[in-house]
Amino acid sequence: MRLFALRGATTVDANEADRILAATTELMHEVLERNALRPDDVVSCIFTVTDDLDAAFPATAARHMGFERVPLICTREIPVPGSLPLVIRLLMHFHAAEDHDPQHVYLHDARSLRADLDAAQ
Protein backbone atom coordinates (compact mmCIF):
# COMPACT_ATOMS: atom_id res chain seq x y z
CA MET A 1 0.00 0.00 0.00
CA ARG A 2 1.09 3.53 -0.77
CA LEU A 3 -0.13 7.00 0.18
CA PHE A 4 -1.66 8.94 -2.72
CA ALA A 5 -3.31 12.32 -3.14
CA LEU A 6 -5.85 13.38 -5.70
CA ARG A 7 -7.69 16.55 -6.60
CA GLY A 8 -11.28 17.22 -7.42
CA ALA A 9 -13.58 20.17 -7.89
CA THR A 10 -17.16 21.04 -8.67
CA THR A 11 -19.35 24.09 -8.90
CA VAL A 12 -22.76 25.15 -7.63
CA ASP A 13 -25.12 27.70 -9.09
CA ALA A 14 -25.99 29.45 -5.82
CA ASN A 15 -24.66 29.95 -2.30
CA GLU A 16 -27.25 27.71 -0.64
CA ALA A 17 -26.51 25.02 1.93
CA ASP A 18 -28.47 22.28 0.17
CA ARG A 19 -26.66 22.95 -3.12
CA ILE A 20 -23.22 22.98 -1.50
CA LEU A 21 -23.92 19.71 0.32
CA ALA A 22 -25.43 18.04 -2.77
CA ALA A 23 -22.50 19.09 -4.97
CA THR A 24 -19.97 17.90 -2.41
CA THR A 25 -21.78 14.57 -2.07
CA GLU A 26 -21.76 14.13 -5.85
CA LEU A 27 -18.05 14.97 -6.01
CA MET A 28 -17.18 12.56 -3.20
CA HIS A 29 -19.23 9.75 -4.77
CA GLU A 30 -17.45 10.24 -8.10
CA VAL A 31 -14.01 10.29 -6.47
CA LEU A 32 -14.74 7.11 -4.50
CA GLU A 33 -16.23 5.31 -7.50
CA ARG A 34 -13.55 6.25 -10.03
CA ASN A 35 -10.79 5.30 -7.61
CA ALA A 36 -12.42 2.21 -6.06
CA LEU A 37 -12.09 3.72 -2.58
CA ARG A 38 -13.96 3.41 0.70
CA PRO A 39 -13.93 5.94 3.55
CA ASP A 40 -11.60 3.57 5.46
CA ASP A 41 -8.96 4.06 2.73
CA VAL A 42 -8.95 7.83 3.16
CA VAL A 43 -6.36 9.50 5.40
CA SER A 44 -7.64 13.09 5.20
CA CYS A 45 -9.55 15.58 3.05
CA ILE A 46 -9.08 19.29 2.61
CA PHE A 47 -12.01 21.18 1.12
CA THR A 48 -11.70 24.71 -0.16
CA VAL A 49 -14.43 27.06 -1.32
CA THR A 50 -14.34 30.32 -3.19
CA ASP A 51 -15.20 33.49 -1.26
CA ASP A 52 -18.76 33.46 -2.62
CA LEU A 53 -19.62 30.20 -0.78
CA ASP A 54 -20.33 30.33 2.94
CA ALA A 55 -23.77 28.73 3.43
CA ALA A 56 -22.40 25.32 4.50
CA PHE A 57 -19.22 23.40 5.23
CA PRO A 58 -18.48 20.86 2.44
CA ALA A 59 -17.05 18.53 5.11
CA THR A 60 -20.57 18.08 6.48
CA ALA A 61 -21.53 16.18 3.32
CA ALA A 62 -18.49 13.90 3.67
CA ARG A 63 -19.34 13.15 7.29
CA HIS A 64 -22.85 12.10 6.23
CA MET A 65 -21.24 9.69 3.75
CA GLY A 66 -19.28 7.75 6.37
CA PHE A 67 -16.21 9.93 6.84
CA GLU A 68 -16.81 10.48 10.57
CA ARG A 69 -13.36 9.10 11.50
CA VAL A 70 -11.46 10.87 8.70
CA PRO A 71 -9.84 14.24 9.47
CA LEU A 72 -11.64 16.85 7.35
CA ILE A 73 -11.07 20.58 7.12
CA CYS A 74 -12.59 23.43 5.15
CA THR A 75 -10.83 26.61 4.14
CA ARG A 76 -11.03 29.42 1.56
CA GLU A 77 -9.38 29.65 -1.83
CA ILE A 78 -7.23 32.66 -2.66
CA PRO A 79 -9.59 35.19 -4.29
CA VAL A 80 -7.69 35.64 -7.55
CA PRO A 81 -9.37 38.24 -9.79
CA GLY A 82 -11.17 36.61 -12.70
CA SER A 83 -11.10 33.10 -11.23
CA LEU A 84 -14.04 30.73 -11.56
CA PRO A 85 -16.75 31.50 -8.99
CA LEU A 86 -18.84 29.16 -6.82
CA VAL A 87 -16.19 26.41 -6.69
CA ILE A 88 -15.71 23.62 -4.15
CA ARG A 89 -12.29 21.98 -4.36
CA LEU A 90 -11.03 18.79 -2.74
CA LEU A 91 -7.59 17.42 -1.92
CA MET A 92 -7.88 13.82 -0.71
CA HIS A 93 -5.07 11.69 0.75
CA PHE A 94 -5.63 7.93 0.67
CA HIS A 95 -3.97 4.54 0.73
CA ALA A 96 -4.14 2.28 -2.31
CA ALA A 97 -2.15 -0.43 -4.05
CA GLU A 98 1.27 0.61 -5.30
CA ASP A 99 0.13 0.51 -8.95
CA HIS A 100 -2.99 2.65 -8.41
CA ASP A 101 -3.49 5.45 -10.95
CA PRO A 102 -5.32 8.29 -9.13
CA GLN A 103 -8.31 9.56 -11.08
CA HIS A 104 -8.83 13.26 -10.45
CA VAL A 105 -12.46 14.39 -10.73
CA TYR A 106 -13.66 17.74 -12.07
CA LEU A 107 -17.40 18.18 -12.46
CA HIS A 108 -19.69 20.78 -14.00
CA ASP A 109 -18.08 24.18 -14.67
CA ALA A 110 -14.99 23.07 -12.71
CA ARG A 111 -14.02 20.92 -15.71
CA SER A 112 -12.57 24.12 -17.16
CA LEU A 113 -9.98 24.12 -14.35
CA ARG A 114 -8.40 20.95 -15.75
CA ALA A 115 -9.24 20.77 -19.44
CA ASP A 116 -6.35 18.30 -19.79
CA LEU A 117 -8.39 15.76 -17.81
CA ASP A 118 -11.68 16.35 -19.61
CA ALA A 119 -10.98 13.78 -22.34
CA ALA A 120 -10.19 11.13 -19.71
CA GLN A 121 -13.47 11.71 -17.87
Image (cartoon, helix red, strand yellow):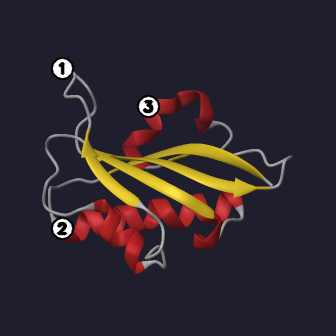
Mark 2, residues whose alpha carbon is within 10 Å: few (<14), some, or many (≥20)? some
Mark 3 highlights which residue?
113
Residue 93 rendering spot, x and y as whole percentages:
57, 50
Residue 60 rendering spot, x and y as whole percentages:
31, 70
> First in sequence: mark 1 or mark 2?
2
Q: Is residue 85 left or right of residue 7?
A: left
- Mark 2 and 3 residues: CB-CB less than 8 Å, in contact? no
Residue visible at 15% across and 63% down? 16
Q: Is residue 6 left or right of residue 18?
A: right
Residue 21 rendering spot, x and y as whole percentages:
30, 68
Check the image and report above or below for 97 versus 6: below
> First in sequence: mark 3 or mark 1?
1
Q: Secondary structure at mark 3?
A: helix
Residue visible at 25% across and 65% down? 19
Residue visible at 23% across and 38% down? 85
Quadrant of the image containing the N terminus: bottom right
Amino acid type of the residue that numbered disc 1 sits on in the rendered structure: Pro
Q: Secondary structure at mark 1?
A: loop
Q: Which mark is residue 120?
A: none
Q: Secondary structure at mark 2?
A: helix
Mark 2 highlights which residue?
17
Q: Report if residue 119 is visible in the image.
A: yes
Mark 1, residues whose alpha carbon is within 10 Å: few (<14), some, or many (≥20)? few
Q: Is residue 14 left or right of residue 38?
A: left
Mark 1 highlights which residue?
81
